[in-house]
Image (cartoon, rainbow, N blue to C red):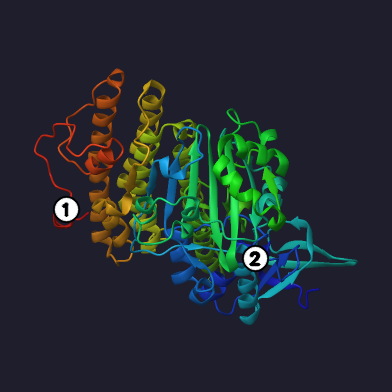
């Protein structure tokens, strides 16, 4: 049980968000007294512990550079990017599915994380730093008070009450404070998921013996987060350390009802219908299945996450939008950074009322902006040409916007965020408008398929690779503002190109507002059409070379 009764901070939940927050707080305020209460028992089982194994650039920066966890990440797999296979015919031959992914590693690293292994390492780290972690214990009650909050804890037959100045709910989907304070908020993104782990390597490279297909990459597809997409669904394949594999099914509930994937036999029957090649591989390793889980309507929002009454929500206890593009750990890093700044300033006797309001609004605004990328967009997954265009667009929005801001450390700098507000709002409005345009295009399109062996190599798109590379650089305030504005102008150019491409494929959609003067996406469109020559006339074409992009500040 607990040896002392009073703490500066009590964190309810010792998973990824709670343990990372404890480390970040200890780093910011070395003398801080922290209690972490976790209901499960350490060490956690490896592989078959939690989903959320795939990380992207912001999470990698958070874990590696902010929390200094390089030694733990070295035990995980370096990720070979996000890779997508579009549905084609009966999905029994992966070489006939349009592929979108990198041919080589990009500049900024990301990782495939075995959550059990990684959280065991985190638990050891927090205890080494003198943070109190008690496992196998339930938080039965939270009482919020003007002076000190109290947390009721039960460990078997023992009961105790700890008091604290701050309480942070990192309890995941139990969402203890959210439910206590009636902060639940629906977002109408009705999606479901099912998943399981297999104690065996499942490598898409082994599914075909076509040398041309096998050798068009410099690394193994096995190390990517592989997505298999079709109308209203995507399936993930994530490699884990020690030769294990995570498999997940994510569906739009209107197209694929939850009961079709809610248990393992149903999920396998669903795979047989929609992803038979993957299912045939899994059939060979049924005796190596480690677990199964399913979740209906997993997406959720929240009315408030931070309060001047000294409570916060972080991780899944707050909001979770969608696992596509692996943003979950990004949101943990962003939220924990807000929480750490608030608590550190409060313990330093600073008035934080204005920051609480600003950070709360900022986090929930970011969550709503992210929602536009997913809500009503699962129908696009059955349109290869449109979905791949959207993927490229979504990468630009991420690397050119929030990932750049988070990497710079400016999220908790109100003066900078105020200066950047117009650019960030323009990013958000442009994204919402473009996501709506994708839906319109898909609704009218009758020619959205690609050649069977098409390969869109986004690592060969210089405007994207340079955006990714710039995440590794340091910026002063003005250069960062200039970079954001440059990225916004790039996005506007891409939007014009997308409109022109949509009109060339689907005249019913109508002409765009202007003729494109750039050709950033030309090779993407060529790859999806099998053309060798430009299919559109571009006024004043501007080559997307590295030299020219650098001169623009892109």
- The secondary structure type at the circle numbered 1 is loop
- The quadrant of the rendering that contains the C terminus is bottom left
Residue 184 or residue 128, whichever sits in front: 128
Residue density around tag 1, few if under 14, some if 14–19, many if 20 or more, within 10 Å: few
Which circle marks residue 388 in the picture? none
Residue sitting at 37 percent across and 34 percent down? Answer: 386
Choose top left, top right, bottom left or bottom right for residue 72. bottom right
Residue 538 drawn above or below residue 314: above
Judge by depth and name the residue closer to the eye, 198 or 328: 198
The number of callouts visible is 2
Q: Secondary structure at mark 2?
A: helix
Quarter of the image for residue 172 reads bottom right
Q: Which mark is residue 116?
A: 2
Q: Which residue is mark 1?
A: 545
- CA gap, disc 1 and disc 2: 43 Å
**Left of 360 or right of it: where is 137?**
right
Find residue 412 and report its horizontal and vertical position in percent.
Answer: 43, 60
Identify the mark nearer the N-term, 1 or 2. Answer: 2
Kindly indicate whether the residue at mark 2 contacts the one at mark 1 (C-beta within 8 angstroms): no
Q: Residues within 10 Å of mark 2 (few under 14, many from 20)?
A: many
Q: x, y percentage for residue 7?
A: 69, 72
Displayed quadrant of residue 35: bottom right
Q: Is residue 444 visible?
A: yes
The answer to which of 310 and 366 lies nearer the viewer is 366
Is any part of residue 21 visible from this angle?
no
């Amino acid at each position: 049980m607990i040896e002392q009764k009073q703490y500066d901070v009590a964190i309810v939940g010792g998973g990824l968000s709670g343990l990372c927050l404890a480390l970040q707080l200890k780093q910011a305020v070395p003398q801080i007294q922290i209690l972490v209460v976790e209901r499960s028992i350490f060490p956690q089982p490896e592989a078959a512990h939690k989903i959320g194994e795939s990380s992207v650039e912001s999470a990698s920066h958070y874990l590696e550079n902010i929390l200094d966890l390089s030694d733990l990440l070295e035990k995980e797999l370096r990720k070979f990017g996000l890779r997508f296979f579009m549905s084609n015919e009966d999905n029994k031959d992966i070489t006939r599915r349009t592929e979108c992914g990198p041919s080589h590693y990009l500049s900024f690293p990301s990782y495939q994380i075995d959550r059990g292994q990684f959280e065991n390492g985190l638990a050891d780290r927090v205890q080494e730093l003198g943070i109190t972690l008690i496992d196998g214990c339930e938080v039965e009650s939270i009482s919020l008070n003007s002076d000190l909050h109290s947390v009721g804890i039960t460990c078997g037959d023992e009961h105790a009450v700890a008091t604290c100045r701050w309480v942070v709910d990192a309890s995941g989907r139990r969402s203890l404070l959210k439910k206590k304070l009636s902060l639940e908020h629906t977002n109408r993104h009705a999606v479901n998921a099912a998943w399981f782990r297999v104690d065996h390597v499942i490598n898409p490279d082994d599914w075909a013996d076509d040398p041309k297909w096998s050798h068009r990459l410099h690394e193994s597809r096995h190390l990517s987060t592989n997505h298999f997409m079709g109308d209203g669904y995507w399936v993930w394949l994530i490699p884990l350390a020690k030769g294990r594999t995570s498999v997940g099914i994510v569906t739009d509930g209107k197209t694929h009802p939850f009961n079709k994937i809610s248990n393992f036999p149903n999920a396998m029957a669903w795979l047989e219908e929609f992803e038979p090649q993957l299912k045939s591989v899994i059939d060979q390793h049924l005796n190596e299945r480690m677990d199964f889980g399913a979740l209906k309507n997993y997406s959720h929002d929240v009315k408030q996450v931070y309060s001047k009454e000294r409570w916060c929500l972080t991780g899944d206890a707050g909001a979770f939008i969608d696992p596509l593009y692996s943003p979950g750990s990004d949101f943990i890093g962003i939220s924990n950074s807000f929480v750490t700044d608030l608590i550190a300033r409060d313990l330093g006797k600073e008035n934080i009322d204005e920051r609480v309001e600003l950070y709360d609004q900022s986090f929930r605004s970011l969550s709503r902006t992210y929602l536009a990328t997913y809500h009503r967009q699962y129908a696009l997954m059955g349109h290869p040409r449109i979905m791949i265009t959207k993927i490229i667009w979504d990468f630009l929005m991420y690397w050119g916007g929030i990932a750049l801001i988070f990497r710079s450390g400016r999220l908790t700098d109100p003066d900078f965020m105020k200066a950047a507000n117009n650019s960030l709002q323009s990013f958000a409005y442009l994204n919402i408008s473009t996501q709506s345009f994708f839906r319109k295009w898909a609704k009218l399109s009758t020619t959205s398929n690609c050649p069977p062996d098409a390969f869109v190599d986004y690592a060969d798109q210089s405007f994207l690779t340079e955006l990714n590379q710039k995440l590794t650089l340091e910026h002063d305030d003005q250069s960062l503002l200039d970079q954001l504005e440059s990225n916004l102008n790039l996005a506007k150019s891409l939007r014009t190109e997308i409109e022109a491409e949509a009109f060339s494929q689907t005249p019913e959609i109508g002409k765009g507002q202007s003729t494109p003067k750039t050709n950033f996406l030309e090779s993407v469109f060529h790859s999806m059409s099998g053309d060798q020559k430009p299919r559109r006339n571009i006024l004043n074409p501007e080559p997307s070379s590295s030299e020219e992009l650098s001169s623009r500040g892109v």
